[in-house]
């Protein structure tokens, strides 16, 4: 009897979801803020007269068969998250002809959490978000519905690496000096997340930074790879603390977050690529020199492009292959991976996929 009642309840929930006017169309929303790891093509609208390798061969050649502005041979992590909830690809906000019904991608290559580049930093991306919020307000003509969608949306955030790349770090830098750098970067991230909260955001997925001393670009170009690694390690350690502090504060009662341990999973793949179906963890597919850490797609440089891109975690010196991003999205999606806590990204979404799972469980109960 109990299982029958449960089945009827789930069936009624499913029917309500199909018939409710609010849910008659896909009711999921996704926004992304960050650097080149998430960039879906904003850069060409910001720098229309600049040569951008990501809009030229060999970028985009695996999945799309043409360059899209993504710094990959295919999709980004954001694309895979959108696919998981049956959303269309979330378009770059700078493309004013795009459809922003389900969200927007504000990320841009080179973006920092600081205001070192006011065209693409975190705060400028939030200003763009504010512009989109106004557009939504005009379209919806319903402040309650606007607030509901912003609250329901999931916000993916990736900042920090370019901040550290921009620092001139002395080789004799002490741990205290490195901590002060990290504290500034995380302070900027924290302030910007609070600003997003004030705009109506509630569900934040924040990734830390890669183990920078181990990635192809730094291994090839820097004599301070150990210090870059230490910066990234400190960032990974301190990020959950600043987010917990926001959550514990009385000013942000509905703040909810999860942290993707990008540092941890990248280190694990670099250390043992074969265990994650890769052949090369620290050698990029496209670039020059030993680690192919530079020059992919540049006109004035010679560079090599690998034959089998799925063998590589990195496509160029700092960004991932389509296969690499797919793997990262898998670890981000479910908290049982051990690399995202306290929630998986899927826990922030309630979609027809979730309801279908409940229906399947109900059927199994008889």
Image (spheres, rainbow, N blue to C red):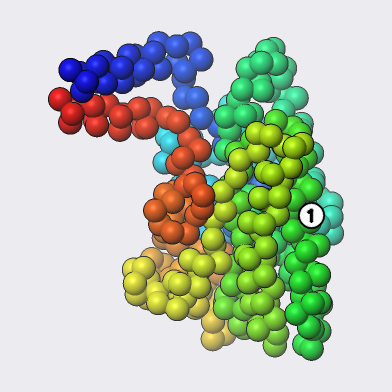
Q: Residue at x 71, y 50 (%)?
A: 245
Identify the residue at horizontal 70%, vertical 40% (top origin).
94
In the figure, residue 136 lies in which quadrant?
top right
User: Residue 289 appears in which quarter of the rendering?
Assistant: bottom right
For the residue pair 4 and 216, the one nearer the viewer reads as: 4
* Quadrant housing residue 16: top left
Residue 342 seen from this side: yes
- Per the image, the residue denoted by label 1 is 188
Task: Residue at 57%, 29% (x, y): give it.
Answer: 152
Q: Looking at this view, is 223 or 145 the one in front?
A: 145
Q: Measured from the top left, where is residue 205 in percent x and y?
A: 58, 47
Q: Is residue 262 above or below residue 101?
A: below
Give left or right: position of 308 versus 339: left
x 34%, y 75%: residue: 274
- From what the image shows, is residue 143 above or below residue 66? above
Report if residue 55 is visible in the image: no
Quadrant of image for the N terminus: top left
Q: Nearer the viewer, residue 209 or 88?
A: 209
- Quadrant (top left/top right/bottom left/bottom right) for the C terminus: top left
- Residue 184 in picture, x, y percent from top left: 81, 62
Query: How many marks on residues?
Result: 1
Q: Can you say whether 143 is above or below 79 in the image?
A: above
Q: Nearer the viewer, residue 191 or 127?
A: 191
């Amino acid at each position: 009897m109990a299982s029958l009642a449960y089945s009827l309840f789930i069936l009624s929930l499913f029917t309500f979801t199909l018939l409710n006017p609010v849910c008659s169309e896909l009711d999921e929303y996704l926004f992304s803020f960050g650097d080149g790891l998430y960039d879906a093509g904003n850069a060409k609208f910001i720098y229309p007269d600049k040569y951008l390798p990501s809009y030229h061969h060999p970028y985009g050649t695996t999945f799309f068969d043409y360059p899209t502005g993504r710094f990959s041979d295919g999709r980004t992590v954001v694309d895979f998250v959108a696919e998981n909830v049956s959303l269309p690809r979330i378009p770059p906000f700078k493309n004013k002809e795009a459809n922003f019904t389900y969200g927007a991608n504000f990320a841009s290559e080179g973006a920092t959490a600081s205001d070192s580049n006011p065209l693409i930093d975190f705060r400028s991306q939030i200003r763009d978000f504010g512009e989109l919020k106004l557009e939504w307000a005009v379209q919806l003509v319903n402040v309650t519905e606007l607030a509901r969608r912003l609250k329901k949306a999931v916000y993916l955030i990736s900042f920090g690496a370019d901040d550290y790349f921009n620092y001139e770090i002395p080789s004799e830098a002490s741990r205290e000096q490195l901590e002060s750098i990290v504290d500034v970067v995380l302070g900027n991230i924290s302030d910007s997340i609070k600003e997003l909260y004030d705009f109506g955001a509630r569900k934040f997925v924040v990734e830390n930074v890669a183990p920078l001393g181990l990635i192809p670009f730094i291994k090839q170009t820097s004599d301070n790879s150990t210090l870059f690694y230490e910066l990234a390690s400190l960032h990974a350690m301190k990020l959950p603390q600043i987010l917990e502090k926001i959550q514990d504060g009385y000013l942000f009662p509905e703040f909810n977050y999860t942290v993707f341990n990008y540092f941890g999973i990248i280190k694990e793949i670099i250390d043992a690529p074969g265990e994650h179906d890769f052949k090369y963890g620290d050698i990029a597919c496209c670039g020059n020199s030993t680690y192919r850490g530079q020059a992919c797609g540049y006109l004035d440089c010679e560079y090599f492009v690998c034959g089998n891109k799925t063998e590589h975690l990195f496509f160029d010196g700092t960004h991932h292959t389509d296969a690499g991003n797919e793997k990262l999205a898998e670890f981000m999606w479910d908290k049982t991976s051990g690399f995202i806590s306290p929630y998986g990204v899927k826990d922030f979404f309630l979609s027809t996929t979730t309801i279908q799972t409940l229906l399947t469980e109900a059927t199994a109960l008889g």
